[in-house]
């Protein structure tokens, strides 16, 4: 043992040595910025306090000023190893980690543990990063959609609406709809260059487009038909649905050429009265107001009147309404 310092009291020094020999924790400065607390909050840059053999159970500083340290799980987690009251390990999740320090910022909880609403909301004044807030935003975006229908990213910046009156008055007319408006026709009056095949050259036929214009075009077999078509009097015609190489009938149609009401290919609409399913927001009610399947679009005054989705312009829809520009060609 070294020599005693001048003026040192041998009795006091002996008491200090006796305490050290019994494994007592080291003393610390109460004015320090704060070491790792017993609840797991990191200090403001204070170095870990060295303790004795019982350092894992002895809090480094119960009343330490909590700061932006690493969140942990109480005194046990704070003790990295016996005799060392090190900084608490990262990754403490949920309310336990969030409630760590007294006044500490729990931003590290949400970022490090990814504990969602539980971890993010646990601390005092803390704001979860990517937990409940991000999940809530995703949940809000899907409100108003029927199951299995995903929001269109193109509508994320558009104003939601339930009627045309919800849309802002702009230089361009805006209307409430579930999808953008499209217009196949418009503009100048249709151009009619022929009325019958005889108005065209020998190898050509007179064809009319969807907007009423007519043109002389080459017919088959000069222009080959598709594999699902056959050439009849210089025109390509879809093969009967029960024929070889024919295309399948449209959705919610069946191939029954023998039934009344079948189209030129032999396809018949599936009737809801016979078990076919109506789309979301439609009810099976065969009658004059029904579509070819016997389905009627359900009316509503609020989304609660619909099985799912939204109420848009008084009708149940599988997705919300959005304000779209409405500018048909003139």
Image (cartoon, grey):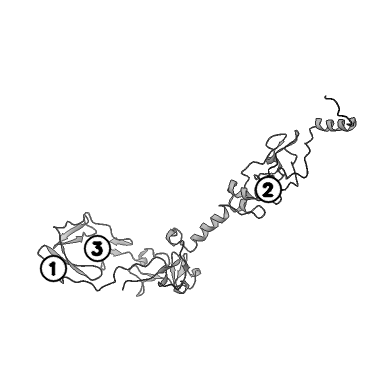
Horizontal side of 69 relative to 230 (left or right) equals: right
From the viewer's perspective, is the residue at label 1 or at label 3 nearer? Answer: 1
Residue in the image at 54% along x and 55% along y: 135
Q: Which dot, 2 or 1, sits closer to the camera? A: 2
| Image coordinates for residue 155, horizontal then vertical, percent | 44, 62
Q: Which mark identifies residue 67? A: 2
Crowding at label 2, few (<14), some or many (≥20) Cα neighbours within 10 Å? many
Circle 1 residue: 197
The reply to whether residue 149 is visible in this rendering is no
**Labels 2 and 1: the sequence-earlier one:** 2
Of the numbered discs 3 and 2, the one sitting upstream in the chain is: 2
Residue 198: quarter of image: bottom left
Rounded to the nearest angstrom, the CA distance separating label 1 from label 3 is: 27 Å
Going 78% across and 41% down the picture, which residue do you hit?
29
Q: Position of residue 114 (x, y in %)?
A: 58, 48
Q: CA distance from mark 3 to mark 2?
A: 76 Å
The foreground one among 82 and 156 is 156
Residues under labels 2 and 1: Cα distance?
87 Å
Can you identify the residue that label 3 sits on?
Answer: 266
Position of 165 relative to 67 (above/below): below
Residue at 61% over, 52% down:
120
Looking at the picture, how far across and down is residue 158, in whole percent?
A: 45, 65
Q: The C terminus is located in which quarter?
A: bottom left
Asked if residue 268 lies left or right of residue 11, the reply is left
Q: Are marks 1 and 3 in contact (CB under 8 Å)?
A: no
Q: Residues within 10 Å of mark 1 (few under 14, many from 20)?
A: some
Which disc, if any, is residue 264? none
Foreground residue among 276 and 252: 252
Eye-nearest disc, 3 or 2: 2
Instruction: Quarter of the image for the N terminus: give it.
Output: top right
């Amino acid at each position: 043992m070294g020599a005693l310092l001048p003026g040192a009291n041998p009795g006091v020094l002996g008491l200090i040595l006796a305490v050290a020999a019994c494994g007592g924790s080291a003393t610390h400065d109460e004015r320090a910025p704060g070491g790792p607390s017993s609840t797991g909050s990191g200090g403001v840059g204070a170095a870990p306090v060295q303790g004795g053999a019982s350092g894992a159970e002895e809090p480094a500083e119960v009343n330490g000023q909590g700061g932006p340290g690493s969140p942990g799980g109480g005194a046990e987690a704070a003790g990295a190893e016996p005799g060392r009251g090190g900084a608490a390990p990262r990754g403490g999740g949920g309310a336990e980690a969030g409630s760590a320090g007294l006044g500490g910022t729990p931003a590290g909880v949400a970022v490090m543990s990814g504990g969602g609403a539980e971890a993010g909301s646990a601390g005092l004044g803390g704001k979860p990063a990517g937990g409940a807030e991000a999940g809530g935003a995703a949940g809000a975006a899907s409100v108003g959609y029927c199951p299995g229908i995903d929001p269109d990213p193109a509508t994320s910046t558009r104003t939601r609406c339930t009627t045309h009156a919800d849309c802002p008055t702009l230089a361009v007319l805006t209307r409430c709809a579930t999808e953008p408006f499209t217009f196949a026709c418009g503009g100048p009056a249709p151009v009619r260059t022929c009325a019958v095949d005889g108005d065209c050259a020998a190898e050509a036929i007179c064809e009319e487009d969807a907007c009423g214009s007519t043109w002389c075009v080459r017919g088959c077999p000069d222009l080959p038909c598709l594999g699902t078509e056959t050439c009849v009097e210089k025109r390509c015609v879809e093969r009967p649905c029960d024929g070889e190489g024919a295309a399948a009938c449209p959705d919610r149609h069946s191939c029954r050429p023998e039934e009344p009401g079948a189209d030129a290919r032999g396809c018949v609409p599936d009737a809801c009265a016979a078990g076919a399913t109506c789309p979301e927001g439609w009810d099976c009610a065969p009658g004059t107001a029904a579509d070819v399947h016997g389905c009627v679009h359900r009316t509503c005054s609020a989304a609660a009147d619909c099985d799912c989705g939204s109420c848009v312009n008084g009708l149940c829809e599988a997705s919300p309404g959005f304000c779209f520009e409405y500018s048909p060609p003139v």
